[in-house]
Image (spheres, helix red, strand yellow):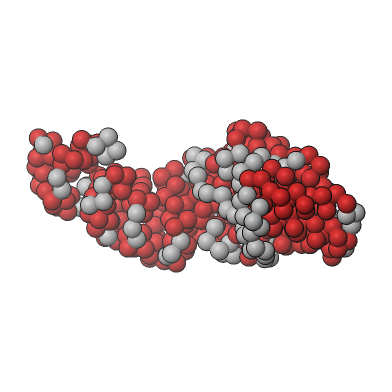
Amino acid sequence: MRLQRLRTGGGHAPDDGGAAAEAAAAALARASAGDGRLAALRALRVAAAHGDPGAAAVVVRDPVMAALIAALRPAPQAAARLGAAEAAWALGSAAASLPILPSIPALVAGTGGGAGGARCAELCAWALGNAAVGGGDATAAALSAAGAIPALLAAWAAAEDEDVAAAAAWALSVAVPAGDGRTRRAAAAPTAAAAAVAAARRGAAKGEAGWALAALAALGPASCAALAGAGVAPVLARAVIAAGDPGAVRAAAHWCARCPPEALAAFASHDGGAALAALARGDGGDAAWCLASVAAAGGPALAAAVAEAGGVEVAERGLTEGGLAAREALFLAAALAAASPARAAALLRATPAPPLLADAATRDAALEFIAAATGAGGDAAAAAAGWRAA
């Protein structure tokens, strides 16, 4: 689960956030409209934006919550539009520590922008993401009932503002894993996949697109098949090739592990195999996991392509790290054993077997590597026998 986010700009943290929030709430109760109401909303947001638990408690109190929900309703006046953004900001800050259940329908509606404008849409999406992280079953049910996933997908797909796209994609990346069964079914639907791929293809989400796609791909084979049908393979390949995008690598890892085997070829062959080469140059378990999935499910031709791209070197690096990185490296080595038996034999001889076989995190992967090397025959089988004896 990715972490919640605080937005602290636009005002200094008060010495006593709770007291400042109480004063702002009192001013908000007195102000009926216009600049006075906007000033009270802004003061409440500043008090809440620094994570003060006393300020958060004020924000979620019934009369204050009702006033903030009212401020989120569309209105044509400039002060009202600014006030809507301030209200969403205050609610999102409080959501980092306390439930904001009554406000969720209004925040979902606010992701569409409308009279509130792009800034309000961005902050509403961010607030929903904060609410989803650690919000529990009641929040998950409220997000589902309010249609948060379709609204966030629509906001991401339609966003002309990069900040709105990034906030909606980030919120999806945390709301989908935290969601209930209804949320997950909505996120796994072909319509959701089509909207997400179309939005990611535009590339305007400040690195958050990959994380959102990863959340959808992690839902299982049905979601991955829907993403494949929507044309995600070249989108992921381009994002991986661009480098510097760990979310794209995570998305590719989840998708390649669960997508239809025939869809792997489109990813692996994109731009002459540049995505495989980019993964081989990267570090971490996600890259090894992705390469292992391509090699294991794509047949001998793709296994050979992964080996040629540098997959064995990725396995070598991962085995030196231990833990989960070594686990993914072992699965990759197993997937490549038939394509590169001589390299598999060298890897077996260069790597001490006892620690990997003794560690619960790596034992099953080590046994799979032994079995694959044994099946490859020749030197690889002999080296595997040495590991088995160890």
179 horizontally vs 31: left or right:
left
Q: Is residue 63 visible?
A: yes
109 horizontally vs 162: left or right:
right
Q: In which image quadrant can residue 45 be found?
A: bottom right
Q: Residue at x 61, y 39 (%)?
A: 135
Q: Residue at x 54, y 41 (%)?
A: 177
Q: Residue at x 44, y 47 (%)?
A: 254
Q: Position of residue 57 (x, y in %)?
A: 69, 42
Q: Residue furthest right?
A: 32
Q: In which image quadrant can residue 34 be found?
A: bottom right
Q: How many marks?
A: 0
Q: Position of residue 147 (x, y in %)?
A: 70, 42
Q: Position of residue 277 (x, y in %)?
A: 34, 63
Q: Residue at x 25, y 55 (%)?
A: 317
Residue situated in front as seen by the camera: 169 or 79: 79
278 horizontally vs 340: left or right:
right
Q: Is residue 157 visible?
A: no
Name the quadrant of the C terminus: top left
Residue situated in front as seen by the camera: 333 or 35: 35
Q: Position of residue 80 (x, y in %)?
A: 84, 59
